[in-house]
Amino acid sequence: MSLDNVNKTLYIPLYGKALVSRQGVILKDITAERIWEEGAVPLGKKSKSRWLAYSMSMRARTFDDWVRKMLAICQNATVLHIGCGLDSRILRVGASGVLWYDLDFPEVIAMRKKHYSESEFYHMISGSAAQPDWLSRIPKDRTAVIVMEGVSMYLSLDALRRLLLALSEHFASFHLMTDVYTELGAKLSRWKNPISDVGVTAVYGLRHPKEPLGKSRVSYVQEHSMTPSDLVNQLTGFDRRFFKLMFAGNAARKLYRMYEYER
């Protein structure tokens, strides 16, 4: 079964997580190591950059830590991971016994089922973030903790607004974290982003964190750093100095941000 260009991007973070996991920094992800070893696909030079691997793994670790925090606050919550790809977040977070839904395109879910098994609490759903009719399959009687990693940049502003509206109409309360491109980041991605290695050119950026709220009953909460100092400091020597200079702090914020929302 072949993947279209957007779906092929799921291998870029998988490679990065496997790389840092083998190095013993930022993120321990034995599942990513195993899946990459079993089914690696050709990636371009930009996609296999160690700087990208560090950035994506810090992003993933920040999402993981946020999910753990929200599950500690929101008792009996439902977790929804939109655009799960082949990610093993449920295992990294240690969320056994938590009602958890991983969502992605049908082709991705078919591939994912080769590596993961459903259970009483864990479910995989086929669907598109741009067409959220799949929400009818998810119980609405609990607070939802929603992760949307590496997804928003493939949704037009109208599609992103429709998704937030659908989520606000389905769940009485939820907490959502998503990463986004800025407008500058979206423009530069046409030339600098590794997703061009797999043929993706149509991406979108936001001018302001409240821009996608539209008519939904969703509120913007705060911005999170995707390169926390405690994770950056796990790097050593030249890697740490160069990463701090080029990929952390204000330099990164000009292109890429992480926002938290709630209903």
Image (cartoon, rainbow, N blue to C red):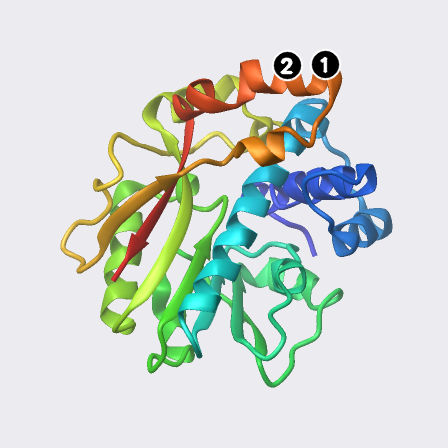
- In the rendering, at what x and y percent does residue 129 appear? 41, 56
Q: Is residue 235 left or right of residue 64?
A: right
- The image shows a total of numbered marks equal to 2
Q: Quadrant of residue 50?
A: top right
The answer to whether residue 53 is above or below residue 18 is above
Q: For the residues marked 2 and 1, what is the alpha-carbon distance in whole angstroms?
A: 6 Å
Graded by Cα atoms within 10 Å as few (under 14), some (14 to 19) or many (20 or more), the crowding at tag 1 reads few
- Specify the quadrant of the image occupied by residue 113: bottom right
- Please state which of residues 76 and 156 is positioned toward the viewer in this rendering: 76
Tell me, yes or no, if residue 27 can be seen here.
yes
Task: Determine the residue positioned at 61% across, 61% down.
Answer: 93
> Image quarter for residue 120?
bottom right
Q: Residue furthest left?
A: 215
Q: Name the amino acid, label 2.
A: Phe
Position of 208 relative to 28 (above/below)? above
Of 229 and 222, the residue lying toward us: 229
Q: Quadrant of the C terminus?
A: bottom left
Image location (x, y in percent) of residue 150? 50, 44
Residue 16, image x, y percentages: 70, 38
Disc 2 vs disc 1: Cβ atoms closer than 8 Å? yes
Q: Nearer the viewer, residue 205 or 128?
A: 205
Which of 199/85 is in front?
Answer: 85
Disc 1 marks which residue? 238
Identify the amino acid type marked 1. Answer: Phe
Q: Residues within 10 Å of mark 2 (few under 14, many from 20)?
A: few
Residue bearing the label numbered 2: 242
